[in-house]
Amino acid sequence: MKTVDKMTLGILSHYFRAAAEAMGFVLQRTAHTTFIKESNDFVTALLTPEGEQFAYSVAIGTQGFVGLEYSHFINQLAPWEEGDVAIANCPYLTHGVASHLPDYQMLKPIFIDGTLVAFAWGFLHASDMGGIIAGSVLPSAYELYQEGLRIPPVKLYRRGELQTDIQKFVLLNVRIPEKNWGDLSALLAALGTGEQRVKQAVAKWGLETVQAARGALIDYAEARARALIELIPDGEYSFIDYLEDDVISDMPVRIKVKATKEPGGSLHLDYSGTDPQVGAAFNLASNGRHPYLCLAIFGYFRSVDPTLPVNAGLMRPIRFTAPTGSVVNASFPASCGVRFALTQTLYGTVQAVLAQALPGQVPALGAGQATILAISIMDLVRGRRQVTVVQPMVGGSGGRKQGDGIDGCDFSQGALANTPVEAIENEVPIVIRDYSVVPDSAGPGQFRGGLAFQLDFQVFHPDTILTARGMERFRFQPFGLAGGGAGTSADCWLNPDTPGEKRLGKINSLTLDAGDVLRMRTPGGGGYGDPFTRDPAAVLRDVRNEVLSIAVARSQYGVVIDHEPDGPTVNVTATSQLRESRPTPIFRQFDPGPGRAAHEALFTPAVADALAELLYSLPSGMRYYAKGRMYERIRARAEAGATVTVDMVMGMQPELMASMGLTEAVRAQVASQGL
């Protein structure tokens, strides 16, 4: 095959990235729903005929799908013809290309004189895909069937002709068909833009050059990624973090990862010991290999080398062990609607691994969640429900050695834009009463975490249904790093600052009445470094900006602030005395906050490992039920004064099996068949 010189390859790298981004801007500017045209929950890319991304949009759209494997999707619909356009949304039938049902996936082949040169690809998040509730994503959904319409890979257009039977079937099963079709039409236009740009490239540089450049661009990104992995010291690094519950129970969902640097600039991420899939919508159908399992690695790549090409080559140096039937590699028909909450925990877990391997180069943990507030309001004229996303609520990022965290924006979700107040109030009949940062919400540190956000909005229609997927960090705070303090927790209230105020905690589904006000507060990011070494001038700046109280300045930072006629000032003498009188602190690389510490006092890492081993010895369909029974037994024995040990946990196995009607013979059969 023809080789491409470095100069031409550099030009084509920028050209094709620009082509992918042009696709994204077409989609954004012509979409119908606010979650696409304002919040940017979509992405566009160009694929090789075999299904690898050789160009990916960086300037616009989410960065969470770099390196997806499309070969199964493509092969299911072969042979392809000019004018074909495929659509799908099922995580299992696309082998992980779709990650939950609201994500429409579309593929369009690009032919030059009968030769398949590339595919234009894009996805967008639909604000409704049918299912059990408006907005489709209900955290407590326990199987995929409840989450909406499942679309296998199928051709929506054949040789340029719309398959109206498929179109009608899809649109009859969603609540906002006009807007869904508007978004899909915008995505179709975006794919057409990608097709035009590829054809223009062939006209300018020739077919052989473009064909050679596709693979060369992926190989080049892979080589650059391997060079960055080589900067990681040899060794094994591990960390454990949690989804703090699964909404339908108070059981945390444990994520355990071990990262091993391997020869040749390779990295192995092993998720053995992670909890089994859960009976709620927090599962990831990863097919054992998915960018969601390593997004923090991509963040490291781009931070160290901002010029790095972004395409499928970034995934090649990383291999995964993700046990089948685990929450990170769920089996059908596990529900997946809120998989993004799990993704944020995965991001933070891998981020903590990198913090061990590369001290000083990695920030403390940010909010680690993105609460997507979706609202359904009855259209009183048509008798149908309007469905839209009010706001993606993101908390602060973690502090870092170079500076404070970013307020209301987490590194793991930088592409997810907020919806302007004017846009959402124009879309649905609600009023935003407050949208602001929260004082005293940053994790303390030499460099503090980013501040949390707070949103108050009021509804004016009765029987308004609200779902809030991805609410997290109410119990387990974002960890502080290198002596920094943990971030602050999230919270939620109904009708705050009134006699009828009610603290809600996490929302599964909530019905609001006319006049109700909901207040949502996100977590604040963890701090980096000893707070008592923070520059007093930086503390004073926060006090003057009214994001830090004088009391917290004193208690968390050891800075004494005096009131003066011209405003607050630092009392230098009192600050020096206070800081010098502090007892020598115990340095902690990670400060997870009191919530996690309380949980792990009972469920120690060794006990949790034993529990995971026990659960995976059971049939997959019984594991979640068994986990609940084991938690009950362990907590009961702890309350009775017993010390919870590994032997105690493993000794409960016969009792557990008997309670589920499982004989030893059945267990042996399960083990032999790998169920």
Image: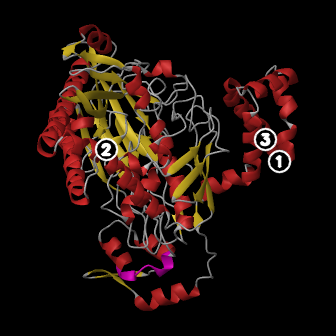
The amino acid type found where label 2 is placed reads Met
What whole-number distance in Å separates the C-alpha atoms at marks 2 and 1? 59 Å
Question: Tag 3: residue type?
Answer: Ile
Q: Residue 620: x and y, percent?
A: 68, 27
Of marks 2 and 1, the one in the foreground: 2
Please identify the residue farthest to the bottom as the structure is shown.
Answer: 573
Determine whether, in the image, residue 214 is placed left or right of residue 506: left
Question: Which residue is painted at 41% across and 73% down in the image?
Answer: 550
Q: Which residues are magenta?
A: 531-537
Q: Residue shown at 19%/25% (left/top)? A: 185
Sequence-earlier tag: 3 or 1: 3
259 and 488: which is toward the camera? 259
Please tell me whether mark 2 sits on a helix, a strand or a loop. Answer: loop
Return the residue at label 1.
646
Q: Position of residue 314 (x, y in %)?
A: 41, 51
What is the C-alpha distance between the residues marked 3 and 1? 11 Å
Q: Is residue 547 placed above or below 26 in the rendered structure?
A: below
Relative side of 272 to 385, left or right: right
- Where does label 2 land, which residue? 1
- Front label number (3 vs 2): 2
* Mark sitting on residue 634: 3
Vertical arrangement, residue 233 with respect to residue 659, above or below: below
For label 1, count other residues whose C-alpha is less than 10 Å away and answer few (under 14), some (14-19) or many (20+).
Answer: some
Disc 3/disc 2 C-alpha distance (Å): 63 Å
